[in-house]
Amino acid sequence: MIRMNKLSKVYRTHMIETHALRGIEIDVQPGEFVAVTGPSGSGKTTFLNIAGLLEEHTGGDYFLDGVNVTGLNDNQRSRLRNEKLGFIFQGFNLIPDLNLFDNVDVPLRYRGFNAAERRRRIEEALAQVGLSARIKHYPSELSGGQQQRVAIARALAGSPKVLLADEPTGNLDTQMARGVMELLEEINARGTTILMVTHDPELAARAARNVHIVDGLVTDFVRREAPSLVAVA
Amino acid sequence: MEVRPILSTLFRNKTAPLLIAAQVALTLAIVANSLYIIRERLASAARPTGLDEPNIGWINLSPVGEVADPKTMQEVDLNTLRAIPGVRSATWANMIPLSQSGWNSGGMSLKEGDNDSGINSAHYFSPGSLVDTFGLNLIAGRDFTADDVFDHDPEQGSALPKTVIISKALAEALLPNEADLGQLVGQQLFNATEAPVTIIGIVDRLQTPWSNEGADGEQSYILPIRYLVGSFQYAIRTEPGQLDRVMKEAADQLSTLRSDRVLNSQRTFAEIRASRYANETLMAGLLIAVTLFLLLITASGIVGLSSLWVNQRRKQIGVRRALGARRIDVIRYFLVENMLITSGGVLLGLLLTLALNQVLVRQMEVPRLPAEYVGFGMVIMWLLGVASVLGPALRAARVPPAVATRTV
């Protein structure tokens, strides 16, 4: 589903070159739940941004659902993002002036679905996260956990191949975090591939596979295997 | 189109959009009415006088003391002027269009004793041919001949002429709703105080010295009179392109011809026109300046609000981009949002425009605003809105989608 070959990212200013990612090799299979961990500044957000087509890589190749995204223009990347990816952000990133219906509607409008199709998907997605009754509410009227559920509904409504979650429980208390995590596990169980960046070792431990990033290098290991870290890049 | 969600967002943040809409409304009301007033004033100032304007000059001299031989002086002066190379025609005249002072008569009528007709006319007279010297277009009848001209000394009450040439506007006032104005040639014209005169010709147009609005600004007649007073004012018509040189030579020669008079003024007709319409031109210029200033203020308001919103919504724009919005989608969002605000302002402005016009019609006797000016004003406001928001919208489109994952 996600395959990166010798993928690198270099940030250049006129004075300095910063190597954020250094030749990453990774292959995420359909339906996998992968946790990406690493210390602050290790490059995991850059990794997520590149995986989510929010930034372009500077070296290597990246295949998303079989499509080589290297060299795609901005419109093609936007289209691919919209069709194949769903995003869940740490700060929820809902639009405060839109009610839940309209928030979930945002990516669907860019997809070009007709009104009836969008309504069906929105109602289904909000039902899936248990917020059907709040469809006309605004984000400020919801708790943090509920807002993150709306963000998940927004991500799910377009039937993405991959869910990218950036610290999805980072702004939630333990109980709410548990609820969100259980929801993600349910979604994964239904076959959606999930790539989750987290600081929390407990959450990472619940993923089937961990990718550890340190200094732009990936240490990839499958949980339940011997804990020997083998650098692959 | 995301009209409903954008409207929903605007309703939740009403104050700034309402202020911008109100500004648009006020600007539309002022711009539409100003444009109309400007056009009216400039159109009025551009009305043709009927004269061959580019080639006409006017010279005025005042005697120092009593002039014993005004007739001789006029003849010598005119012979001198006509001898200047480039002069096509020259004659003495009591006044010239647009000069803002002159003679007029009331009670013009085709019937004797009909003093209440109310037709006022500018009263031109000259011993020569004003048709030739002013370059008027004779559309019926004939010009004066030397036999038509009467010497008139106001102090001696000598005889008055028996023929007259009238303007088409005066002819239309005398014979309203009559297509064949030529039938007036040969008829007698009466006024309250003078003996009747026979109409011998009609000129297409001869504006009055006051150039008032409407048809009475062109109601004029010409009498063939040699006016024997010590006032010397000459109209000169030159060959094309010769006017400036001829006027200078004419002034020099008339000044050196006699020492018992002084040159008051020498002006081309373009200078007379500029002087007559100086206030109108100034007013139009001020209105244009105010209109442009208002448009600038409104555009600044829209640019300011849009820029503020782009900065405030930077994260939101990044999220939209992350969720699949293309750059063009972001630009379209801001354009649609602005169009909604501007359209609200335009609708409100439509009412304000009509209300302001009502006030102007009542208070300043401005004509009722034609619909096309309202439409033109609306288009200007919409274009202004689009042009103003385009910069901020393009800036918004450059917000990278990676902003969505940034925590600060």
Image (spheres, helix red, strand yellow):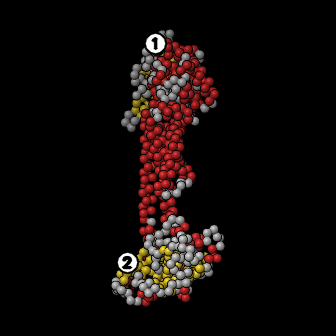
Query: Is residue A126 or residue A159 the one in the foreground?
Result: A126
- Please indicate, yes or no, whether residue B239 appears anywhere in the rendered image: no
Query: Is residue A128 or residue B99 the one in the foreground?
Result: B99
The residue singled out by tag 2 in the image is B264
Residue B406 in the image: x percent, y percent? 43, 27
Residue A117 in the image: x percent, y percent? 63, 27
Residue at 52% from the left image edge and 13% from the top image edge: A182
- Please indicate, yes or no, whether residue B139 appears anywhere in the rendered image: yes
Residue B261 is left or right of residue A196, and the answer is: left
Q: Amino acid at mark 1?
A: Gln
Q: What number of labels is visible?
A: 2
Circle on res. B235: none
Disc 1 element: helix
Disc 2 element: strand
The residue singled out by tag 1 in the image is A175
Residue at 50% from the left image edge and 78% from the top image edge: B193
Residue A203 in the image: x percent, y percent? 47, 14
**Do tags 1 and 2 sit on the same chain?**
no
**Where B7 sits versus A130, above or below?**
below
Q: Amino acid at mark 2?
A: Asn
* Residue density around tag 2, few if under 14, some if 14–19, many if 20 or more, within 10 Å: few
Residue at 49% from the left image edge and 37% from the top image edge: B397
Instruction: Please name which of the two marks, 1 or 2, marks the residue nearer to the observer.
Output: 2
**Where B85 sits versus B294, above or below?**
below
Quadrant of the image containing the N terminus of chain B? top right
Do callouts 1 and 2 mark residues in contact (Cβ within 8 Å)?
A: no
Query: Is residue A192 or residue A22 the one in the foreground?
Result: A192
